[in-house]
Image (cartoon, helix red, strand yellow):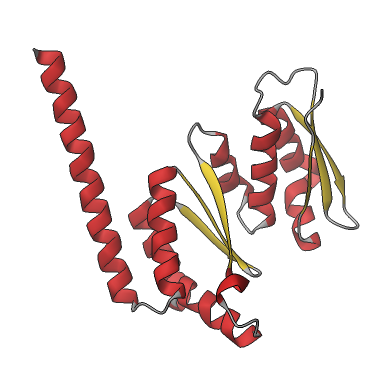
Amino acid sequence: METREFIKVPKERVAVIIGSNGQVKSMIERETKTRLDINSEDGSIVITPTEETDDPLAVWKARDIVRAIGRGFSPTRALRLLDEGELLEIVDLTLFTNKSKNSLTRIKGRIIGAGGKTRKIIEEISGANISVYGHTVAIIGNVEQGRMAKEAIMMLIKGAPHSTVYSVLQKRKRAQKRKWTSWKTLGENQIGS
């Protein structure tokens, strides 16, 4: 049985998914060995495997790449999802607002920061990529990077001061580095014995 995925993206993002002369669409199809049937009128996309599809997760990878572009990522950043262990998580900000446009705008502003500073700091410290688009925040990264970025975003949504969020991120980064160093040392000791 053929695995298919059906998704909808914002109509204004369809052109980005297709790309100039269809280049982005072709690249996604080539890299995942899938076929994308795009309806430019309503933003619906059907993703199906092809005869060349050899990865059982290819359709899902293509779906996540398309979803990432649909949520505001550039195609280059979205293609990061081809790498093993890279995941896409989308946080719906309307779940944390009182449904008012002002509340949503305030939360998005806190996550982006003045001139994009906060988003950039979260990306630099966590290693994840973040896109704030429409009523969502999308995160691309491995499990640990995604966890760090999401924790920072949730703190900002709940009203934590930016300085506190940066401090928590720095602590998590140091703890992660210590954990990696001790695993590396353990491995070297076992190899040396």
Residue at 44%, 42% (x, y): give it: 142
Residue at 57%, 34% (x, y): give it: 82
Q: Is 40 placed left or right of 66 in the picture? A: right
Instruction: Tell which residue pokes out farthest to the top in this image.
Output: 193
- Reply above or below: 140 against 185: below
Q: Position of residue 97 (x, y in %)?
A: 58, 79
Q: Is residue 123 visible?
A: no
Res 154 quadrant in image: bottom left
Instruction: Tell which residue pokes out farthest to the left in this image.
Output: 193
Q: Is residue 52 visible?
A: yes
Res 125 quadrant in image: bottom left
Quadrant showing the N terminus? top right
Residue at 80%, 23% (x, y): give it: 50
Q: Is 166 placed left or right of 18 in the picture? A: left
Residue at 21%, 52% (x, y): give it: 174
- Reply above or below: 121 against 172: below
Quadrant showing the C terminus? top left
Across the whole image, how many numbered discs are drawn on residues? 0
Q: Position of residue 96 (x, y in %)?
A: 55, 74
- Reply above or below: 49 against 166: above
Q: Position of residue 31 (x, y in %)?
A: 66, 29
Q: Position of residue 44 (x, y in %)?
A: 84, 51
- Reply above or below: 41 against 65: below
Q: Is 28 placed left or right of 154 in the picture? A: right
